[in-house]
């Protein structure tokens, strides 16, 4: 597992019907080096640099102390693989064409800039970027470049993560620990602390990022939801996995995701304010308050099918 960050995808489309669009292209189509040496080209290239080398520019070890907005040394590309261009690895291709969009977590229409800052505060365990700063402009330019052939409102094949249908049982963290030891620990370490690209303090980040502990995503990140994490793992992990050629079964992905999420990580304050329209709250958002009266333990580890069916019954009345 190269990481399981960010957990909500920047590339998710709105709930409105979307126009058809082509799939994600091969890497050559997103080669930023072919752009002219003009203001747009330079900003796009900086955006890709920020994506791949986030710790060096924005992390807690960044040389420019004024730009230390991230609270950990993870990179955007740890989750948005291939610098946001890999299918079903939460790609950014098409993201620029789907915003503004309604977001259930805020129960409001959000901009792409607000979505980026959601990741900064949660997946990066940090603080929001200034909306008018060069770094936010660079992220926007890079996402615009990746989406330049995508019609407004279109959904690109390979966006986001495929829906994950969990086994009809509680996730087994002990079984997940065995999967982790056999499939994940060789890269991420038995303690989940990852493997540094250099040394602590040099801003180089990770070869294989931390999956838990103080330098990982916090409990407010989308990837802290079991069904999201399992979908990411199933389609992208271990390293080299693709959507077309998974290496783990649904059961293995489900259990190992539960094991990873059972480990300690930073805590985000104010999660009770997330999903103010409670009937829109995902069943695997493992923090209160809830409208279904079910303990947090089941929202964290399942089984999820009863929760989903219960919410279908409660939603009409709760939404009034």
Image (cartoon, rainbow, N blue to C red):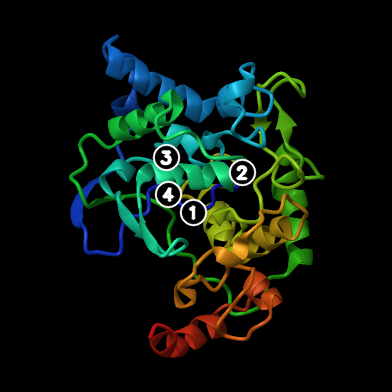
The residue indicated by pointer 4 is: 88
Q: CA distance from mark 3 to mark 1?
A: 16 Å
Task: Look at discs 3 and 1 and give the one toward the viewer.
Answer: 1
Residue situated furthest top in the rendering: 37
User: Which residue has dot 2 on it?
Assistant: 3
Q: Secondary structure at mark 2?
A: loop
Q: Residue at x 65, y 22 (%)?
A: 204
Q: Measured along the vertical axis of the image, is residue 89 above or below residue 75?
A: below
Per the image, label 4 sits on a secondary structure element best described as loop
Q: Residue at x 63, y 45 (%)?
A: 1
> Which residue position holds label 3?
86
Residue underneath mark 1: 8
Q: Is residue 235 above or below residue 32?
A: below
Marks 2 & 1, CB-CB < 8 Å contact: no
Gap between marks 2 and 4 measured at Cα: 14 Å
Mark with earlier residue (2, 1):
2
CA distance for labels 2 and 1:
14 Å
Residue placed farthest to the right in the image?
Answer: 191
Q: Residues within 10 Å of mark 4 (few under 14, many from 20)?
A: many
Taking 195 as reference, is 303 left or right? left
């Amino acid at each position: 597992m190269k990481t399981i960050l960010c957990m909500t995808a920047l590339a998710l489309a709105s709930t409105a019907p979307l126009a058809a669009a082509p799939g994600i292209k091969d890497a050559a189509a997103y080669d930023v080096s072919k752009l002219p040496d003009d203001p747009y080209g330079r900003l796009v290239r900086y955006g890709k640099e920020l994506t791949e080398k986030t710790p060096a520019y924005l992390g807690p070890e960044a040389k420019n102390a004024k730009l230390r907005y991230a609270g950990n040394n993870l990179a955007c590309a740890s989750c948005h693989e291939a610098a946001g261009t890999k299918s079903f690895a939460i790609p950014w291709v098409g993201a620029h064409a789907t915003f503004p969009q309604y977001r259930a977590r805020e129960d409001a229409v959000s901009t792409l800039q607000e979505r980026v800052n959601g990741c900064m505060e949660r997946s990066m365990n940090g603080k929001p970027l200034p909306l008018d700063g060069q770094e936010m402009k660079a992220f926007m330019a890079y996402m615009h470049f990746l989406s330049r052939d995508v019609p407004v409102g279109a959904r690109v094949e390979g966006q986001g993560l495929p829906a994950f249908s969990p086994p009809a049982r509680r996730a087994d963290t002990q079984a997940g620990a065995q999967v982790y030891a056999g499939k994940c620990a060789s890269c991420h370490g038995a303690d989940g602390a990852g493997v540094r690209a250099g040394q602590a303090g040099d801003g180089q980040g990770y070869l294989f990022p931390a999956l838990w502990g103080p330098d990982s995503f916090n409990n407010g990140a989308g990837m802290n939801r079991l069904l999201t994490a399992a979908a990411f793992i199933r389609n992208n992990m271990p390293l080299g996995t693709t959507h077309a050629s998974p290496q783990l079964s649904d059961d293995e992905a489900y259990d190992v995701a539960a094991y990873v999420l059972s480990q300690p990580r930073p805590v985000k304050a104010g999660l009770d304010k997330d999903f103010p329209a409670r009937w829109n709250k995902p069943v695997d958002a493992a923090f209160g308050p809830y409208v279904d009266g079910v303990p947090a333990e089941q929202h964290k580890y399942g089984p999820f099918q009863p929760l989903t069916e219960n919410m279908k019954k409660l939603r009409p009345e709760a939404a009034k």
